Amino acid sequence: MKSLLVRFFLFSLVIAACSIAVTAWLASQATTGAIRQEQGEALETDAAIVDELVGYAATHRDWSGAKGTADEIARKYDRRIALADRTGRKLVDTGNENSPQLPITPRAVVDPLNVNGEIDRRAVGPFKLTDEEHRLLHAYSAQLSECNRYITIVDAPNGRPRLSNDQPGNLSKWEDCTVGDRLYTLTATETAAYEELQALFTKCLAAQEGEPSIVDKPPSRVMLDWDVLMVRDSPPDVVSCMDTARREQLEPYVAEPVQLFLTQVTGDEPRPIDLSTTGATRITLVALGILAIAGFASWVTATQLVRPIRALTAATKRTAEGDRTARVDGGAGEIGELAKSFNAMSEKLAETERQRQAMVSDVAHELRTPLGNITGWLEATQDGLAEPDPHLIGILLEESLLLQRLVDDLHDLAQADAGTLRLHPEPIALDDVVEQVVTAQQNREVLLRAETTPVHITADPVRLRQALGNLVANAVRYTAPGGEVVVKLFREQDNAVLEVTDTGTGIAPEDVPHVFDRFWRADKSRSRRTGGSGLGLAITRHLVEAHGGTVSVTSALGEGSTFRISLPA
Ligand code: ADP
């Protein structure tokens, strides 16, 4: 989880998943909504067209004059309307040559005597009042309204005025009015129609098996509800007989049932569903919400990611300005690794800095004494206090040789540091090298001897002599007169080993790790003359390592030391 890569990956994954989910959800919502709305509109329009056509059929005996009405309806609803009779003959078509083909199945059947099983209210047939009756009844209803101004009079489909259905409590009030009775007495037209209906009804009942139900004579007063003609709570056969009778009676007065076909006005593609505006506000809000959440999450994640990078940048700046103590805690993961590397680099830089400062001060210190001596003797000579005799010249030469050696050593080290220390390897006999060094270092105070076996390797003989010479010189230097120094050469597995063992002062255990450091001396007060510059072992180590070998030391204080060079043979 700490890995930058994993965090980036997971974060992108989550954002992408959220976006896809929300987009899909919005799209489905918008589409469903738009389709539902579109379908709803279409259904509503169709239902309205059917209703208007049923109204026409209920009040007309046939469709011959229906073209005008159909055109009007078609214009109103922006549809093309076609009507065909049972045989498929086209009776009315509001379309033109641009209109598309009619569908195979009709949209609906327009039948005023069967609208979802019911008879349309507007089909009144013989119950329709004559103009005279209509006028008379309206005169009564006007009087009734005057008598009781709280009542509302509405026209029934056959033209008869009657009390509005939603005023049942007003019954007693209009009964007080004398016109009430007259208004609600059947007209001649209605009586005739009722009688005709009664006859058809009775005939139907008689045709049925069993005891015909007892049915009232036609009412002397009009039923309050035009739809419910007498038989609402009667047995089913009675109800169906009343329906049959009504249909039979009305049939001649209404237009025949026809099939209704509806299409677009022109043959163009159907109007595409428009999603652009559907829930535009909601989509905008949700999109903004997602944007806000994603933005917030990004901000939080980015801040977390950037924090260690900022710390690193600040630390780098401090380091660049010379502060070697700058360290970063980068946590785990890639940035953590970077921080660790940076800390290691800072550490190394500080260490190098320390070494450089120590080196400069050591060099200055080492140069000061011989230079001081030389200057002192020369000044004394100038002042006439000392004679420039061979003795003085010998002293001055010794001091300048010391300086020369120091500068040579420094040069070697500088080359080793810069990686420009050049080796000239060639096949050599190591026992010859040992022989040369031992011969060169012989003196009368210490017994120096070699124990060699013939070993041949490829190496730079000059540099190897220098390295071994340093060890032997040290051994002789730190061994009291009468002591012994042995240089051994032998093979050990794939290595050639050179061991310099002395019976000298030895090195304290706490000093052992430092003997190969530059300018390090066990005895700080020992003069250069006896103790050397403190660079010898450092140079030896560099030379041996340049040959791919190692140098090590084991020592016991007061008993002697053994320096050991191991070279790949
Ligand atoms: P120096 O020129 O002072 O000898 P080196 O680098 O050769 O410088 O040695 C560093 C220090 O290690 C010496 O000053 C001495 O204290 C210690 N040392 C080196 N070789 C021996 C040895 N054979 N016996 C005891 N001490 C030694």
Image (cartoon, rainbow, N blue to C red):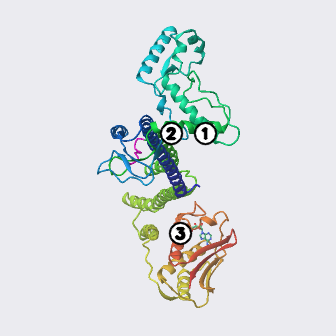
Measuring from the top left, give residue 506's x and y in whole percent: 66, 70
Q: What residue type is labelled 1?
A: Cys
Q: Which one is nearer the viewer's eye here, 324 or 564?
A: 324
Q: In terms of secondary structure, what is the magenta stretch mainly?
A: loop
Q: What residue type is labelled 3?
A: Ala
Q: Which one is nearer the viewer's eye here, 34 or 491?
A: 34
Q: What residue type is labelled 2?
A: Leu
The Cα–Cα distance between marks 1 and 3, rounded to whole angstroms, is 135 Å
Measuring from the top left, give residue 164's x and y in whole percent: 53, 20
The Cα–Cα distance between marks 2 and 3, rounded to whole angstroms, is 123 Å
Which callout, 2 or 3, points to the residue nearer the camera? Answer: 2
Q: In this view, does 297 lie to the left or right of 63?
A: right
- The residue wearing badge 1 is 204
Considering the image in quadrants, where does the N terminus appear?
bottom right
Instruction: Write the start and end of the magenta stretch as one range.
Output: 272-277
The Cα–Cα distance between marks 2 and 1, rounded to whole angstroms, is 18 Å
Q: Which mark is residue 417?
A: none
User: Is label 1 in contact with label 3 (beta carbons under 8 Å)?
Assistant: no
Q: Which one is nearer the viewer's eye here, 62 or 417?
A: 62
Image quarter of residue 228: top right
Q: In this view, does 16 lie to the left or right of 497?
A: left
Look at the numbered disc 3 and say if its residue's Cβ is closer than 8 Å to ligand 1.
yes
- Which quadrant of the frame does ligand 1 lie within? bottom right
Measuring from the top left, give residue 195's x and y in whole percent: 55, 29
For mark 2, does the 10 Å Cα neighbourhood hold few (<14), some (14 to 19), or many (20 or more) residues? many
- The residue wearing badge 2 is 113
Measuring from the top left, give residue 39's x and y in whole percent: 46, 44
- The residue wearing badge 3 is 538
Q: Is residue 53 left or right of residue 444?
A: left
